[in-house]
């Protein structure tokens, strides 16, 4: 296998993005990591960049393979400059993938190129322009949206207005992008008068867009052309959509016209799931006779190889009380004809057969599915096991459990965990042991998430031998240390598994190397503390206190709380000192509150004095910011609650009333109230006058009798005191 993979990676044509994409996918699924890397680099360096949709698929596969270096190589070749702009939809696909890859500059460059240079003949295609506009909008490419909308509006005189779905999509994108001028130009050509009325889905979309935009005249024009009388009744999905739109708009006459043409007799029955949609809409419209007629037709003629569609039909039959249709459909033996290729669809059909009480059909389908279900997707196999268990199909459960344990694909650990859980619930202990051993021997030990998930399920399942096998592969030494929250999860699972040596090893690695700025470091500290890893706690506590981001008050408070629980007094002092010197007043206030609630009076006094000292000696420093009135109010409040009179005096000496920004009324009011509670009358009056001059607050609560023309407080007065000439 390895030899073949390496040969394929070395000799495949790197200029063909389609072929390379398919080969990369197969190599990735086969776990041929080295071959994936080799082929990814060759493709990135040589792939033809002229076809945007092909490059998009290649980028997607490189992203799934984690081939970041290859992605960088490909982006350095500037696919935005080489992409053929002839087809807007293809360009939109590449833009979407560039956005997912995080290639912002390349994405912006391609968006501007496409907006400026798209072939004018393509701008007459409403669907293509709408798709491109939608991707520009999703990507945040505002300039490109405006440029393309203006060009599209300029060519609107030639746009094809016969396609109602395309026009609806284009109008919707213009509306979402705020392109009022483009909307006016397009509506000026009267699309309602030109729309093809035989397309029920398109007419429904156009009516819906007119309704959302409040275009009453356009709605009247379109309905005046009587679309209900012209709609193609062989399209069940379109008729269902049109009925739904008529119902939402309260168009009773149009509904009556459409039902009078007997859509139940004309609907194409090729796709049972689509027929189910029409049944639902007929039921909503109160067309009972049409529901019964269509149900019997569908039951007798629907394609039984589509398990999801048949399941939807059965569900609609059940909802509408069409018992005769259920009986007719079951007589045709859908369990024997269902295609088993898509396991979730088979699960859906099993569920509906069970709800219909069709026990023989359930048994038949259960045995077929258990013997032939695709095992490459363990999550779907787990769903199938769950449904078989609900159906009481014990033989089928046993057969599927045996197959899954021996052959289930192990490349998706989360899915394997789900499958193990279902096997455990089914009581298939041998299958649990077999799959657990396979997973323990093959899962990637560098993935902390995978190892943690598996350890947890092994423990729940009592698969002790599998735990030993997995621990022998030393995940503590190999696990990546990001993200921090997942490392904490792995520590927890190792601790619960009683793997003390692995806990110690991972604890020391994580304490020394984990990102100290990551807020999840609090969770890691907690796990280290619970594990009794005191040295690791001290090391991480020191690093976290020295580097924690002080701009996030909640995270700082959480860290302080965990440091106190861990008894890391030096780290607490270090964090408090940093906060006093560098954090915003609101952050310091919250830290003071946390320490006060914990009864740490000495720490409160120390932090308060430090905060006040830094406030006193750093009048122009960013870390002594008095411009935030809400933050200063919080700080004063905590000083007051803590009895830190000296700190209050130092802070008030810096004249916060003169420095506070007056942008937010509620924040200014908060500081005014705190100054009042603190007894700082002069500061309160000064701030109140500034706020009144700026129009931020009214004067009633500060100057009850108002102000004279020179701004000074007015004395008491009554209406009789006013001059008659006033």
Image: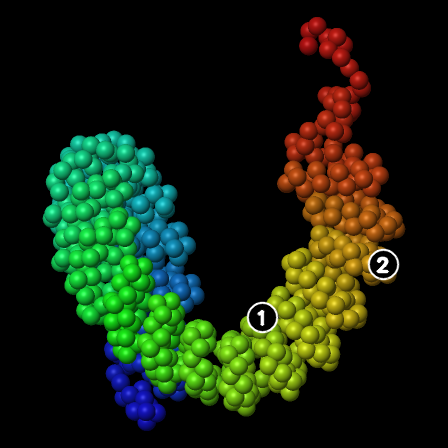
Splitting the image into 4 quarters, where does residue 22 fall?
bottom left
Residue at the spot of label 2 = 601
How far from the left and from the top, in percent, is residue 313? Answer: 24, 56
Q: Which of the two labelled residues, at mark 2 and mark 1, occupies the earlier sequence position?
A: 1
- The residue lying at 23 percent from left, 33 percent from top is 252
Label 1 secondary element: helix
Splitting the image into 4 quarters, where does residue 560 fall?
bottom right
- The residue lying at 50 percent from left, 86 percent from top is 466
Residue 172 visible in image = yes
How far from the left and from the top, in percent, is residue 273? Answer: 23, 57
Residue 416 sits above or below residue 712 on the image: below
Residue 526 sits above or below residue 614 on the image: below
655 to the left or right of 323: right
Label 2 secondary element: helix
Return the residue found at the far bottom.
3
CB atoms at circles 2 and 1 under 8 Å apart?
A: no
Residue 162 visible in image = no
Name the mark on residue 144: none
């Amino acid at each position: 296998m390895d030899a073949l993979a390496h040969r394929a990676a070395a000799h495949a044509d790197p200029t063909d993005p389609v072929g390379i994409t398919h080969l990369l996918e197969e190599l990735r699924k086969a776990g041929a990591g080295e071959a994936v890397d080799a082929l990814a680099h060759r493709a990135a360096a040589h792939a033809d960049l002229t076809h945007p949709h092909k490059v998009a698929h290649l980028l997607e596969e490189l992203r799934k393979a984690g081939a970041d270096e290859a992605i960088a190589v490909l982006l350095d070749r500037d696919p935005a400059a080489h992409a053929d702009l002839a087809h807007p939809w293809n360009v939109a696909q590449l833009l979407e993938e560039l956005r997912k890859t995080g290639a912002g500059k390349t994405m912006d460059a391609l968006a501007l190129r496409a907006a400026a240079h798209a072939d004018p003949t393509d701008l007459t295609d409403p669907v293509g322009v709408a798709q491109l506009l939608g991707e520009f909008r999703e990507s945040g490419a505002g300039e490109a949206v405006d440029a393309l909308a203006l060009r599209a509006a300029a060519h609107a005189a030639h746009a094809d207005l016969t396609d109602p779905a395309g026009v609806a999509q284009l109008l919707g994108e213009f509306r979402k992008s705020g392109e009022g001028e483009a909307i006016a130009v397009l509506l000026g050509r009267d699309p309602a008068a030109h729309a093809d009325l035989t397309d029920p889905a398109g007419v429904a979309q156009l009516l819906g867009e007119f309704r959302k935009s409040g275009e009453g005249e356009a709605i009247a024009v379109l309905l005046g052309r009587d679309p209900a009388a012209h709609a193609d009744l062989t399209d069940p999905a379109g008729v269902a959509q049109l009925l739904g739109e008529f119902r939402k708009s309260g168009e009773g006459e149009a509904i009556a016209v459409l039902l009078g043409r007997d859509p139940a007799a004309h609907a194409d029955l090729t796709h049972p799931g689509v027929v189910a949609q029409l049944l639902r809409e007929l039921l909503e419209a109160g067309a009972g006779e049409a529901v019964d007629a269509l149900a019997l037709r569908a039951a007798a003629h629907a394609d039984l190889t589509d398990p999801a569609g048949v399941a939807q039909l059965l569900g609609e039959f059940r909802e509408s009380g069409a018992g005769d249709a259920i009986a007719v459909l079951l007589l045709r033996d859908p369990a024997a004809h269902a295609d088993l290729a898509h396991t979730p669809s088979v699960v859906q059909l099993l569920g509906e057969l069970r709800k219909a009480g069709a026990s023989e059909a359930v048994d038949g389908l259960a045995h077929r599915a258990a013997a032939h279900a695709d095992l490459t997707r363990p999550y779907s196999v787990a769903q199938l096991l769950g449904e078989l268990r609900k159906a009481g199909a014990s033989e089928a459960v046993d057969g599927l459990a045996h197959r899954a344990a021996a052959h289930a694909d192990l490349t998706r650990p989360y899915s394997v965990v789900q499958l193990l859980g279902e096997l455990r619930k089914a009581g298939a202990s041998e299958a649990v042991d077999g799959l657990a051993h396979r997973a323990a021997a093959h899962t990637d030990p560098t993935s902390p998430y995978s190892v943690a998930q598996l350890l947890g399920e092994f423990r729940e399942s009592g698969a002790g031998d599998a735990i030993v096998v997995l621990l022998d592969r030393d995940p503590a030494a190999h696990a990546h240390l990001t993200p921090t929250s997942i490392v904490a999860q792995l520590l927890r699972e190792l601790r619960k598994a009683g793997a003390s040596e692995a806990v110690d090893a991972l604890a020391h690695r994580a304490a020394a190397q984990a990102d100290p700025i990551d807020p999840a470091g609090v969770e890691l500290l907690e796990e280290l503390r619970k594990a009794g890893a005191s040295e690791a706690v001290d090391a991480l506590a020191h690093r976290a206190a020295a580097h924690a981001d002080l701009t996030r008050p909640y995270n700082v408070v959480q860290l302080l709380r965990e440091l106190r629980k861990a008894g890391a007094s030096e780290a607490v002092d270090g964090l408090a000192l940093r906060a006093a010197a560098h954090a915003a007043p609101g952050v310091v206030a919250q830290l003071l509150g946390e320490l006060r609630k914990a009864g740490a009076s000495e720490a409160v006094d120390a932090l308060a004095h430090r905060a006040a000292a830094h406030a006193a000696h750093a009048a122009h420093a960013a870390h002594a910011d008095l411009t935030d009135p809400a933050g200063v109010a919080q700080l004063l409040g905590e000083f007051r609650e803590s009895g830190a009179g000296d700190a209050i005096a130092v802070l008030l000496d810096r004249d916060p009333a003169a420095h506070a920004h007056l942008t937010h009324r509620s924040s200014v009011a908060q500081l005014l109230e705190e100054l009042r509670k603190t007894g700082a009358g002069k500061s309160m009056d000064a701030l109140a006058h500034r706020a009144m001059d700026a129009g931020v607050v009214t004067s009633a609560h500060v100057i009850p009798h108002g102000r004279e023309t020179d701004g000074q407080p007015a004395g008491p007065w009554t209406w009789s005191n006013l001059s008659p000439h006033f």
